[in-house]
Image (spheres, rainbow, N blue to C red):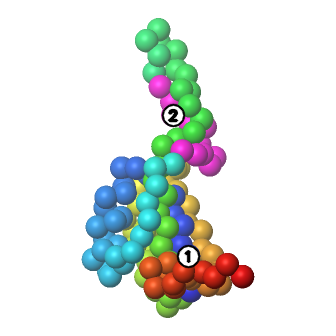
Amino acid sequence: MKKIEAIIRETKFQDVKTKLTKIGVHGLTAFEVRGRGEQPGILRIGGDSQDYTSDDLVPKMKIEIVCIEEEVKKITNSIVANAYTGNPGDGKIFIYDVLDIIKISTSGIPSND
């Protein structure tokens, strides 16, 4: 099993989510996050003609998906295709190995041993 974490622009989230559903991804977790990569932050135009950076942490969406290894390429390709603008700040995708999954609703109550 693999875990895919994607950090994308907020404005691209709905497109990405819709396309993931169309390719058969129904289980995902999404978070509103703030962060930055190489981009300096949000550039604002000041009222007195001075530009300033209001925050160096940019609002993003983080998507987490756990899938079988054979689906990783299809899922990551879909995320890239639908999150891409060609500008800095489009995001990143991280892929991790998942060692085990425990489904709480069907695993029973743990013993007190």
Q: How crowded is mark 1: few (under 14 residues within 10 Å), some or many (20 or more)?
A: some
User: What kind of residue is marked 2?
Assistant: Ile
Is residue 86 visible in the rendered image? The answer is: no
Q: What element carries label 1?
A: strand
* Residue under numbered circle 1: 3
Task: Tell me which residue sits at (44%, 79%) in the image.
Answer: 105
Task: Tell me which residue sits at (63%, 76%) in the image.
Answer: 96
- Magenta stretch in the rendered image: 34-44
Comparing 78 with 70, the one in front is 70
Task: Tell me which residue sits at (52%, 15%) in the image.
Answer: 50
Is residue 7 visible in the rendered image? The answer is: yes
Front label number (1 vs 2): 1
Comparing 98 with 16, the one in front is 98
Task: Tell me which residue sits at (53%, 72%) in the image.
Answer: 4
Q: Is residue 47 above or below residue 92?
A: above
* Residue under numbered circle 2: 42
Residue 28 falls left or right of residue 112: left
Q: Does the magenta stretch include residue 43?
A: yes
Mark closer to the chain start, 1 or 2: 1
Q: Is residue 26 above or below residue 48?
A: below
